[in-house]
Image (cartoon, helix red, strand yellow):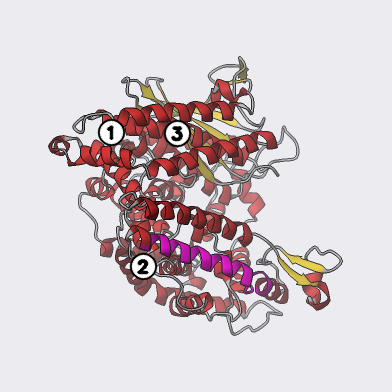
Amino acid sequence: MLRFTARSLARRALISRPIIRSLTTSRYLSANGLYDIPELEKKEGFTVLTKDALKKGATIVDRIITHPSDSIEILKDFDELSTVLCKVADVSECIRQVHPDDEYTNSAHSANTSINNYVEQLNTNPALYGSLKAFMEHEGYANLDDEAKQAAAQFMEDFKVSGIHLDDDTRAKCVQLHGQALAYGQSLVYNSFLPTRLLKERCPTILKNNFKSDSNLVFVTHPVTYSEDSELRAMSYLAYYGYNPSINDVLVSLLNTRQELADTIGYKSHAHRSLATMMAKKPGTVENFLEKLSEKVYPIAKSEIGKMLELKASVPNQIDPKTIHPWDLAFLEKTYREQLSMVKQTEVSQYFELDGCMERLGELLNALFGVKLLKGSVKDGELWHDDIEKYVVVDENSQLLGTIYFDFFPRSTKGVYNCHFTIQVGRETSSGESELPIITLCFDFPKPERNDAPVLLPFEAVDNLFHEMGHAMHTIFGRTKYQTVSGTRCSTDFAEVPSILMNEYFLKDTRVLERVGVHHKTGRSLPNEVMRNIKLSASLFPALETQTQVFYALYDQMAHLSAPNESTQTTFRNIYNKYMPMQYIEQTAWYLRFHHLHGYGARYYSYLWSRAIAAMIWETCFKENPFSREMGEKYRRELLQYGGSRDPWEMVAKILGHQPSVDDMVEALAKDVMQRKRSAPSILVA
């Protein structure tokens, strides 16, 4: 019944004056705790916050079950209960991943675990469920606005997928199975990053020479994808992605437990359970979407493999030059990008200095939404590291809309990169006041050795910055009465639309790109050769990239349609050979390193689904003018501000002028692939 935001999880002509500036001349003001939360001045504050949240939660639960069934206070208190718990769960989820102090991270982890355990109890509380059910069945429910109905429906769906309708013993079994599935999933993720350990006496020399070892073992920590030595690429790939019985046992246990849980609750499969609250709704819709997309893209991807073969023949000393293997892909893309480009990546980064990128990103947001991105003042103790930068988003009347903390650089103690944490959503409180969004964005930008040196970003980092800012704007502009449906708290296959629109369409448009990229010393805009270099990175083999995503999504879908009734390798091989234009390498098990099977669990299709919607929005609203204030305001008004408080199909239909079909979405992606191919060098076009 309670939803936490996953961390996962643009618009008038650009103005020329700088709009990023400090609100005060001092970085630090009076002392306070993390995020300006007084309790978090010390690590023990997480314990204080948790105890307070659990106490308030119990009081709210007592209120809910005593309200008359026709009282709107039932829904308001459900949302208040969710808010009280999320405020601790969300901040602790972030801090346990990013804080450099182990004592803080451990305290945050304990708080997060305590809140999540309490949520599991609430999700199976018959009295709470009964109150919500009676409220939704009351005759006055039909007169509620769409947002209230959407919030109530989401709470109810969370109850149902937790087996609330079952008897006590069966419900207890559901709780047990859920815990087991979570444990198996976490184990799968952990194991997917472990190195392959090879006996030194039997290990090929080329691996001994390129990986660390001890007296008995060689540790293959990754496939060497960019090496010119094809033997090293092949051997490291085969070793790293070799079949591992122990990890396979974990995967099989995860899939079996998820299927048993679905059976117990009353779903045909885990995929059916997972998709119940998504735009797609049913596995059949997802399969139809992916199959039709494959029919469009696979022949083009196969022709791209043919072009790769031609290109591979020009590279000396390659093993099996008449075949493209998985370990060739990244190397060939890198090789031919370098051959076709006169510009080195170090030259590209000269045009993307961090402060300048932030300034011009702010200008884009100002052009489209009329907002400003400003550096904010910071209180002592508010940040968890000196590298963190605080920005605020304000409207044209200088009214604060929200706050974003940027954790730009990698640290050995930092567990996540290129992700979005919602610390607090934008919502109207029960007292009628407005709570403003608070967000953390985490990156792994290259940090210069000298503090006074400019931070120069490779284009991939700029791409990540725009993507995560798409999520941030979804949260910043979210304005709902109920926090459970604010900002990115929407279906997974809709949540990626704003982020993909930002990095795949706005950033990759030449008119935007030439304004974002400015040489940090000369002030010169991106020259044609640098622009061409960037375009190359996005258009070398677009069909193969898309088809690979189709394959990943189909494997994720098929794996969750039933308990494994054959070996996992057989299932994977069959899907691979049908949907990938390359031959499967026997005795490899890439899927055992595919940790998204845990986090997505039948929802990996969401990226392609969201990209299709983003492509249609771009084509309809922004292709003619990517700086259109009129279209920016429409996008904000019709989609961003509602978060998950409206049916996403209705929001998409409103902004497009019609409700798209699956065929429309497939056509949008196929058209996008062809447009990218037309921008590729002629040598790569079949």
Question: Label 3 to label 2, Cα distance in Å?
Answer: 37 Å
Disc 2 designates what residue? 290
Residue visible at 39% across and 71% down?
297
Q: What amino acid is at disc 2?
A: Leu
Numbered range of the magenta stretch: 238-263
Q: Which residue lies furthest to the top in this view?
A: 30
Q: What amino acid is at disc 1?
A: Leu
Residue 559 place in picture, x, y as percent: 44, 69
Q: Is mark 2 on a helix, strand or loop?
A: helix
Q: Nearer the viewer, residue 251 or 316?
A: 251
Which mark is nearer the camera, 3 or 2?
Answer: 3
Question: Label 2 to label 1, Cα distance in Å?
Answer: 38 Å
Residue visible at 32% across and 37% down?
636
Q: Is residue 222 left or right of residue 126?
A: right
Count of marks, rendered view: 3
Question: Callout 3 environment at 10 Å: few (<14), some (14 to 19), or many (20+)?
Answer: many
Disc 3 designates what residue? 85
Disc 1 designates what residue? 75
Q: Is mark 3 on a helix, strand or loop?
A: helix
Q: Nearer the viewer, residue 91 or 206?
A: 91
Q: What amino acid is at disc 3?
A: Leu
Instruction: Determine contact: label 3, label 2, CB under 8 Å.
Output: no
Number of the label disc, if any, that sits on residue 509: none
Residue 33 place in picture, x, y as percent: 59, 23
Residue visible at 49% across and 68% down?
541
